[in-house]
Amino acid sequence: MAAILSVRDLVKRYDDGFEALSGVSLEIEQGEILALLGPNGAGKTTLISTICGITEGTSGSVTVGGHDIVTGYREARRMIGLVPQEINLEPFERVINTVRFSRGLFGKPKDDAFLEKTLRQLSLWDKKDSRIMELSGGMKRRVLIAKALSHEPEVLFLDEPSAGVDVELRKDMWEIVAGLKASGTTIILTTHYIEEAEAIADRIGVIAKGELLLVEEKQALMTRMGQKQLQIDLTEPVSKLPSTLAGYDLDIAADGMAVIYSYDTRSERTGITGLLADLSKAGMVMRDLQTKQSSLEDIFVGLVAEDAA
Amino acid sequence: MNWQAIRSIYTFEMARFFRTLMQSFISPVISTSLYFVVFGAAIGSRIDQVDGVSYGAFIVPGLIMLSVMTQAISNASFGIYFPKFIGTIYELLSAPVNFLEIVLGYVGAAATKALFIGIVILATSALFVDLEIQHPFAMMAFMVLTCISFSLFGFIIGIWAQNFEQLQLIPLLIVTPLVFLGGSFYSISMLPPVWQTITLFNPVVYLISGFRWAFFGMADVPIGLSLLAIAGFTGLCMIAVWWIFKTGWRIRK
């Protein structure tokens, strides 16, 4: 698959010397969903704003569908739809007018049938004549999506689509995203909700302090970084581990009623058999066993902490 | 050229105007009538004639100019300041449009509104005084050019302003005094000689004088100078707007 979006060594330095992006390179393939994860202030929005033309990069280059965003800004921007993080809408406008405006602004001829389809898809059709200030927060966010989709973009940027959105709407949003992916739209979303990335992304990029720490297939990332933990519940509390168990990576639970063994799922021998045998030998009686796969969240926290160190 | 975009911006802006059509229509009618009562009836009864024109008719060009200039500035400055204020400017910045298209859309709409109000005032004036327009074509041309140039100027103010106070600052502090002192309600030949010279540094004098020439065939300054002044002002504003978009001043971080 060809890259529809290609970012090379993108740097954004503000006048006061603050570097919001320090050399980000990224390739995004047509039709995929990429989630950019990162804490607040990591540079997610700056990256999107620079690609979309709202801020200018200091150095580096970006192409969208092969068009440079500076020299070929018309072709590049025509392909892009942007759903900003903030709800920026004209309060007195009617939904249909603001969506028509967006379509025209991007140079597309009037097509009310297409806009009707888009508004219906977003459950906004019955609100088309409402003033924006009459809508709920969730509805306003849908209007932003409708505006971004109004000119039939091939690449859609969703900046924190579920910030301040209730659980139900978030699920709706994921369905919308899935629908768009099915129709071939490439989607780049930023989020700091790990479960969001886990639920909908094909690939995940982790960004912190203006640097892209990694970009990987979601599954591969979870497997590669995946630590598993085995928790062994005991019948009697322990305060200190016998020396025979010193060779294992063991922790004692806070109440002493369990020991926790961390191991790597990728290694050939996980050491579980030996550990259980040694526990029995040491006279510890096991009551129950449970294993836990680390989530993307754990991976993420680990990565960002590593970067900070 | 992205003509669709120009049309979209233009119609979107005009829609705002049509939503408040009654206000847009009534306020100039009332204020014009008030000017006629105060200046025309009260003062005019003592002045009688200026250069052979009744005082009531004499102030019509100045009245129109006063409203057209202030309306053009406030419409255009608000038109671009509002998206900046509420954040919808992101869409404009990320759209496949260049500065010329944005300016054509916003300034075109602001100028249209100002022109509409100018015509309303002209029609209202005709109810109060006998008006004869000697050079109707030149009159329209002057009015249209003033609408465009002052809308451009307003557009610049809208981009420059960082809060609502600043939005009002230049119109109140600079434009209104210049218009009032620019011979809207008197001929500069009525002033003492020293003030006649000082007044010539007021650019608005040239506009009002030229506009008045189109009505009555008489002017404070030669008509060529008036044309030069309005062309120069339009040119300066165009250069400023071009520079703003080239550097992204106050719009692109």
Image (cartoon, coloured by chain):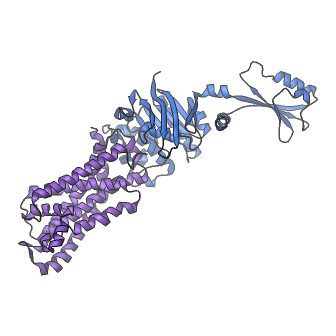
Seen from the viewer's position, the closer of residues B92 and B15 is B92
Vertical placement of residue A23 versus B42, above or below: above
Residue B69: horizontal and vertical position, in percent? 24, 61
Residue A191: horizontal and vertical position, in percent? 56, 40
Where residue A217 sits, quadrant-wise, is top right
Quadrant (top left/top right/bottom left/bottom right) for the N terminus of chain B: top left
The outermost residue toward the front is: B194
Q: Colour of chain A?
A: blue
Residue B250: horizontal and vertical position, in percent? 39, 50
Is residue A257 in sight in this rendering? yes
Q: Colour of chain B?
A: purple
For this view, does B106 lie left or right of residue A152?
A: left
Where residue A121 sits, quadrant-wise, is top left
For this view, does A74 lie left or right of residue B49?
A: right
Is residue A90 in sight in this rendering? no
Seen from the viewer's position, the closer of residues B180 and B16 is B180
Where residue A40 sits, quadrant-wise, is top right
Vertical placement of residue A85 versus B191, above or below: above
Seen from the viewer's position, the closer of residues A100 and A49 is A49
For the point 83% across and 22% down, the residue is A273
Quadrant (top left/top right/bottom left/bottom right) for the C terminus of chain B: top left
For this view, does B21 lie left or right of residue A268?
A: left
